[in-house]
Image: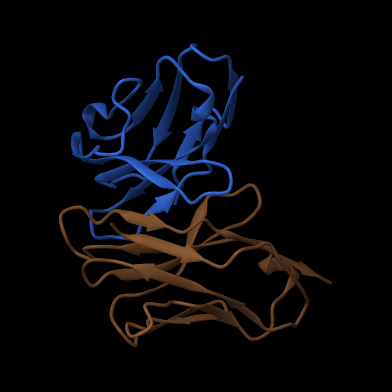
Chain colours: A brown, B blue
């Protein structure tokens, strides 16, 4: 079945540091890929997405590129801020436009950014 | 625009008791989802509704969990009787349709003692 694997956390960085959060996936078809973020006390929010190979999703300074050859969708940001402290989830939707476009999530990783 | 509303936000019960959660999706959203998020894991889909019909309930433990979406708007998720392993955050999400972005509510944190 489909699965998403995220790197182990938590991650603690200083403000303005470079961020990489690894995500790899297993899917039978050609999924869409997503990063969701959950700020303290809030619901999950879509951060960015990519629907086909080599697509790059971007939002709020975060980027992730859909790499079919390595089945990866790593999240990066060049300079993190304290306000980026949250839990980040990688997810896939397979089939991307089928009758049951349900999301499969990774375990999530907690990011803490120190001033 | 109002987001997805859920209540209660927190619930503590003893095992073998019953509990119900309520979700009010974003107005006009035809698709509604219930997810279970156990501590340290990602959300897992329990059930998906399209209007008031069930699209996918393959991961719903039907011996103790039930859900309904009367009139295709609000939804309730019930657990009867609860077990210790049901302790989790229950998330409700909605979308315009099955292929659209899902918007999540804040969740209900259930603790079963």
Q: Looking at the rendering, which quadrant does residue B111 occupy?
A: top right
Place of residue A52 in the rendered image (x, y in percent of width and height, measured from the top left) = 28, 80
Name, please, the residue furthest toward the right: A115
Which residue is depicted at the point 44% across and 43% down?
B4
A18 above or below B45? below
Left or right, residue A98 beside residue A82: left
Q: Quadrant of the N terminus of chain A?
A: bottom left
B89 above or below A97? above
Place of residue A110 in the rendered image (x, y in percent of width and height, measured from the top left) = 65, 60
Left or right, residue A14 beside residue B103: right
Q: Quadrant of the C terminus of chain A?
A: bottom right
Which residue is depicted at the point 37% across and 60% down?
A3
Which residue is depicted at the point 31% across and 59% down?
A2
Q: Judge by depth and name the residue closer to the eye, B73 or B12.
A: B12
A52 above or below A25? below
Which residue is depicted at the point 48% across and 35% down?
B6
Left or right, residue A68 beside residue A56: left
Place of residue A35 in the rendered image (x, y in percent of width and height, measured from the top left) = 47, 67
Name, please, the residue furthest toward the top: B17
Place of residue A111 in the rendered image (x, y in percent of width and height, measured from the top left) = 67, 65
Q: How many labels were placed on the picture?
A: 0
């Amino acid at each position: 079945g489909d699965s998403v694997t995220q790197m182990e956390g938590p991650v603690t960085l200083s403000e303005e540091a470079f961020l990489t959060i690894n995500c790899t996936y297993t899917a039978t078809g050609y999924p869409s890929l997503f990063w969701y973020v959950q700020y303290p006390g809030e619901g999950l929010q879509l951060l960015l997405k990519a629907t086909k190979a080599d697509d790059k999703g971007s939002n709020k300074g975060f980027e992730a590129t859909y790499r079919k050859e390595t089945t990866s969708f790593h999240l990066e940001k060049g300079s993190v801020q304290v306000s980026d402290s949250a839990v980040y989830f990688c997810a896939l939707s397979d089939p991307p436009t089928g009758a049951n476009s349900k999301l499969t999530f990774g375990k999530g990783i907690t990011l803490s950014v120190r001033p | 625009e109002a987001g997805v509303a859920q209540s209660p936000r927190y619930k503590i019960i003893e095992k073998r008791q019953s509990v119900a959660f309520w979700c009010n999706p974003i107005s006009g959203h035809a698709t509604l989802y219930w997810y279970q998020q156990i501590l340290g894991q990602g959300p897992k889909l329990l059930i998906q509704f399209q209007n008031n019909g069930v699209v996918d309930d393959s991961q719903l433990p039907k011996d103790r969990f039930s859900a309904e979406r009367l009139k295709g708007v609000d939804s309730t998720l019930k657990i009867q009787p609860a077990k210790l392993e049901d302790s989790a955050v229950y998330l409700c999400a909605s979308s315009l349709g099955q292929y659209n972005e899902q918007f999540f509510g804040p969740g209900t944190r259930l603790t079963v003692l």
